[in-house]
């Protein structure tokens, strides 16, 4: 049989940002341990109706990025239908029957690739039919809860599109902002971002909720450091609900409904390399230095 030749493909990648809140452990090894434990313990989490999700496979590799080694975990993440019930109807005789299903065997299987970059605390997902970043968010939130210690806490946030935040800030009017944020894992950002992120961290603020309304001029200005910084932190570390005027109409916008989509065009064999390179370039311009996250 002829060996299959790798092809150039176009992929759509979405990401989740993880943050461990712990006095006992921190840094890359703590995040690796969490993702490894979820896989090792075969933790499955319901994500939608009878649909469950699980890490099917997991491998540890080292990828060279910008001349420095970056350890990653990668594999397949899977979705399947968990059938639980003894009452089945036989349409031939319209009788209720009990069916003995094969143990630990489930239908409606879907899978896709994931890449976890501990250095940036990001889990990247290749979007495919049946596997979305919102479902993976539910999976991670349920799974992490099962592997951390009782005195630890965590956050999982969907990376959101820059476009939806631009839509808010460039609207004709901003009538209301509800901003929900936490501090970052020392991600990179501009001055307003660094200001708000550092203030949250210095105050040991686990979560800040800002309910912003305009004064008598009926329009919130976002070009001030506190609002600008909060909106930029929210892109990776929270979310925003906004009421804006757009084309003369009042519209409500929720940023979580607009995940960041990163198109990657590369040879099939170079997908992981490209994902890791993208994550590091986006969130770690200080790649390689020791951090206390």
Image (cartoon, rainbow, N blue to C red):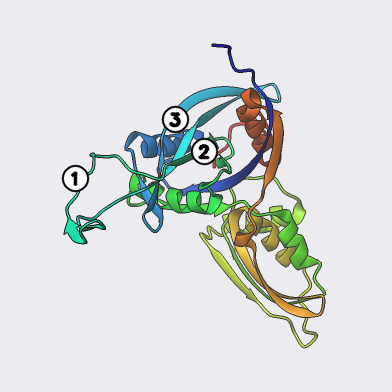
Q: Earlier in the sequence, mark 1 or mark 3?
A: 3
In which quadrant of the rendered image does the N terminus lie? top right
Alpha carbon separation for disc pair 2 and 1: 30 Å
Q: Seen in the image, is 162 located left or right of residue 209?
A: right
Q: Earlier in the sequence, mark 2 or mark 1?
A: 1
Q: Seen in the image, is 61 located left or right of residue 266?
A: left
Quadrant hosting residue 34 = top left
Residue annotated with mark 3? 58
- Residue 87, percent across and down? 20, 58
Q: Is residue 224 visible?
A: no
Alpha carbon separation for disc pair 3 and 2: 12 Å
Q: Residues within 10 Å of mark 3 (few under 14, many from 20)?
A: some
In which quadrant of the rendered image does the C terminus lie? top right
Q: Residue at x 23, y 39 (%)?
A: 103
Alpha carbon separation for disc pair 1 and 3: 31 Å
Task: Give the number of the disc on residue 100.
Answer: 1
Q: Secondary structure at mark 1?
A: loop
Disc 1 versus disc 3: nearer the observer: 1
Disc 3 versus disc 2: nearer the observer: 2
Q: Nearer the viewer, residue 45 or 49?
A: 49
Q: Residue at x 38, y 39 (%)?
A: 38
Q: Seen in the image, is 79 located left or right of residue 205?
A: left
Query: In the rendered image of this protein, does residue 147 appear above or below residue 118?
Result: below
Q: Secondary structure at mark 3?
A: loop
Q: Residues within 10 Å of mark 1 (few under 14, many from 20)?
A: few
Residue annotated with mark 2? 112
- Residue 255, percent across and down? 64, 62
Q: Residues within 10 Å of mark 2 (few under 14, many from 20)?
A: some
Marks 1 & 3, CB-CB < 8 Å contact: no
Q: Residue at x 53, y 37 (%)?
A: 114
- Residue 257, percent across and down? 61, 61
Marks 2 & 1, CB-CB < 8 Å contact: no
């Amino acid at each position: 049989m002829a060996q299959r030749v790798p092809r150039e493909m176009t992929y759509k990648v979405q990401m989740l940002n993880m943050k461990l809140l712990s006095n006992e452990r921190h840094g890359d090894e703590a995040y690796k341990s969490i993702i490894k434990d979820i896989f090792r313990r075969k933790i499955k989490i319901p994500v939608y109706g009878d649909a469950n999700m699980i890490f099917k496979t997991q491998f540890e590799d080292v990828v060279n990025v910008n001349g420095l080694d970056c350890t990653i975990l990668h594999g397949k993440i899977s979705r399947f239908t968990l059938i639980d019930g003894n009452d089945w109807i036989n349409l031939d005789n319209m009788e209720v029957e009990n069916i003995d299903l094969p143990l630990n065997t489930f239908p409606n299987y879907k899978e896709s690739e994931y890449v976890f970059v501990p250095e940036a605390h990001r889990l990247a997902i290749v979007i495919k039919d049946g596997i979305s970043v919102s479902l993976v968010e539910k999976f991670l939130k349920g799974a992490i809860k099962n592997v951390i210690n009782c005195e630890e806490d965590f956050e999982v946030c969907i990376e959101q599109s820059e476009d939806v935040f631009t839509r808010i800030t460039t609207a004709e009017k901003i009538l209301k902002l509800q901003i929900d944020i936490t501090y970052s894992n020392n991600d990179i950002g501009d001055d307003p971002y660094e200001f708000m992120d550092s203030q949250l961290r210095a105050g040991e603020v686990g979560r800040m909720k800002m309910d912003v309304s305009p004064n008598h001029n009926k329009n919130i200005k976002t070009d001030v450091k506190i609002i600008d910084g909060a909106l930029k932190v929210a892109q990776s570390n929270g979310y925003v609900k906004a009421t804006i005027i757009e084309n003369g109409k009042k519209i409500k916008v929720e940023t979580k409904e607009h995940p960041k989509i990163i198109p990657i065009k590369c040879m099939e064999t170079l997908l992981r390399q490209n994902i890791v390179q993208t994550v590091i370039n986006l969130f770690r311009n200080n790649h390689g230095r020791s951090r206390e996250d």
